[in-house]
């Protein structure tokens, strides 16, 4: 336990950081997902929106850090805005509010050659219509963020006019922005490849940034940590977007090769720490809170869904708490004086601090279990849903893989 003066400061910093740290769960992270080679079904996986809310409620109950659930419109509100009342009812029942609203312009057959970038103006209109409907759903549910990810692109050189598609995207996004209410935001997510393997219309942060800027003041960029080329310096992108006031949110996950959607911090925890460090340094330097939606976007094909989610939240809290321990005045001094070793040591020292005892203290002080995974396991929820859900004979709800 940390007891000295420095320890008390540490504890304060960690308590303050965790009080402010909320991370959104993805509804699709509780459903069966797989790869393009197939799905291994889990008896306890959520199939209905009620089950997704129930499972998310468990993660929030034991971690206290996940009060919202991101919804995918086609998967979670197949009836559109008419389903909003049911969502509100489930939110109240399970103690988790609806979070970001994710339109789906990649699944229907008409989107084979794209959505907002489709050469067919009728299909572009349909895609825009779906995004506008999603904005209305968000309005009805009191959700701030509409999160846009596009699968648009092409597989072979010369098969599409990249410039035209860029313009159609700009037009569509501007039109969508026009439907936002004052407190809503459009988040533009980028991804370099997959499902398109030659060109992707919104392939990187530069393209997302330009689209966000040209569509209107309430559009920001969404950084999915898995959506980068190998070796790309993600924290530098984060620093730029922060400095331009254009960072809207994150989809957190980890990866080894491509968009692997693995558990946060499972491969490279230092990467996530460095991202958090940029954010907290910006907030310290400017004395402002960055308006960032922290969201999880993971697909646990093999791990138990709820346990994987609790593990993710715990890891996120640990890395955020470590980043909160960076001695900011010292770091600034070292940077100014180009004291390279000492500057880097500021990060390393914080990163190597064991914050777990302090996090346990924080949790207990909030009336939460010191060990959320253990509390979940003791609760008997998993055993109960495994029995209940293995008795049903309904086909798995659609999901992205
Ligand atoms: C994409 C991207 C989006 C997610 C879809 C299903 O790779 O990460 O955020 O909504 O997958
Ligand atoms: Mn994502
Ligand atoms: Mn992804």
Image (spheres, grey):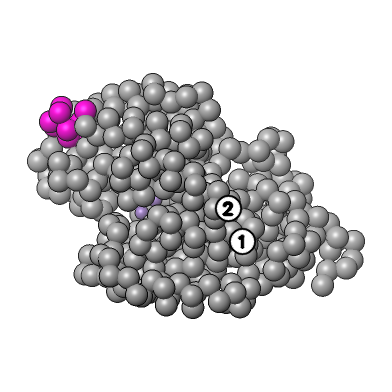
At 53% from the left and 28% from the top, the residue drawn is 183
What is the span of residues highlighted in magenta in the rendered image? 117-125
Horizontal and vertical percent position of residue 113: 14, 41
Q: Toward which corner of the image does residue 200 lie, by quadrant?
A: top left
Which sits in the foreground, 11 or 63? Answer: 63
Q: Toward which corner of the image does residue 346 lie, by quadrant?
A: bottom right
The image shows residue 34, relative to residue 18, as above or below, that is below
At 58% from the left and 53% from the top, the residue drawn is 95
Mark 2 against mark 1, which lies toward the viewer?
2
At 54% from the left and 68% from the top, the residue drawn is 311
The image shows residue 230, relative to residue 102, as above or below, that is below
Horizontal and vertical percent position of residue 348: 66, 63
Residue placed under numbered mark 1 in the picture: 61
Whether residues under marks 2 and 1 lie with C-beta atoms below 8 angstroms apart, the answer is yes
Evaluate whether residue 368 shows in this view.
Answer: yes
Horizontal and vertical percent position of residue 109: 15, 46
Horizontal and vertical percent position of residue 123: 17, 33
Residue at disc 1, CB closer than 8 Å to ligand 1:
no
């Amino acid at each position: 336990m940390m007891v000295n003066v420095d320890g008390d400061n540490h504890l304060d910093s960690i308590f303050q950081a965790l009080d402010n740290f909320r991370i959104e769960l993805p509804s699709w992270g509780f459903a069966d997902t797989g790869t393009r080679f197939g799905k291994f079904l889990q008896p306890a996986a959520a199939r209905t929106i009620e089950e997704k809310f129930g499972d998310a409620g468990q993660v929030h109950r034991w971690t206290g850090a996940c009060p919202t659930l991101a919804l995918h419109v086609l998967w979670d509100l197949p009836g559109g805005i008419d389903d909003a009342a049911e969502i509100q009812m489930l939110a109240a029942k399970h103690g988790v509010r609806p979070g970001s609203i994710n339109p789906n312009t990649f699944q229907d057959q008409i989107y084979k050659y794209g959505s907002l970038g489709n050469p067919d103006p009728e299909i572009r209109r349909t895609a825009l219509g779906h995004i506008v409907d999603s904005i209305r759903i968000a309005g009805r549910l009191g959700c701030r963020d509409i999160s846009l990810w596009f699968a648009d692109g092409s597989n072979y050189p010369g098969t599409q006019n990249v410039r035209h598609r860029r313009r159609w995207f700009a037009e569509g996004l501007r039109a969508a922005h026009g439907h936002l209410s004052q407190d809503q935001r459009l988040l533009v997510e980028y991804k370099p490849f997959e499902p398109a393997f030659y060109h992707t219309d919104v392939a990187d942060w530069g393209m997302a940034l330009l689209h966000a800027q040209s569509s209107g003041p309430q559009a920001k960029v969404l950084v999915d940590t898995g959506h980068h080329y190998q070796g790309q310096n993600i924290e530098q992108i984060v620093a730029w977007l922060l400095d331009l006031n254009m960072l809207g949110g994150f989809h957190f996950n980890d990866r080894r090769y491509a968009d692997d959607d693995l558990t946060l911090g499972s491969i490279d925890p230092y990467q996530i720490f460095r991202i958090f460090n940029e954010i907290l340094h910006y907030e310290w330097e400017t004395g402002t809170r960055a308006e960032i939606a922290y969201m999880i976007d993971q697909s646990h094909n093999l791990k138990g869904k709820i346990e994987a989610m609790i593990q993710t939240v715990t890891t996120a809290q640990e890395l955020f708490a470590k980043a909160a321990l960076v001695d900011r005045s010292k770091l600034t001094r070292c940077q100014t004086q180009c004291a390279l070793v000492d500057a880097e040591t500021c990060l390393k020292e914080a990163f190597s601090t064991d914050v777990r005892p302090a996090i346990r203290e924080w949790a207990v002080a909030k009336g939460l279990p010191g060990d959320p995974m253990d509390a979940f396991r003791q609760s008997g929820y998993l055993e109960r849903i495994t029995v209940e859900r293995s008795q049903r004979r309904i086909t798995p709800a659609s999901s992205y893989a």
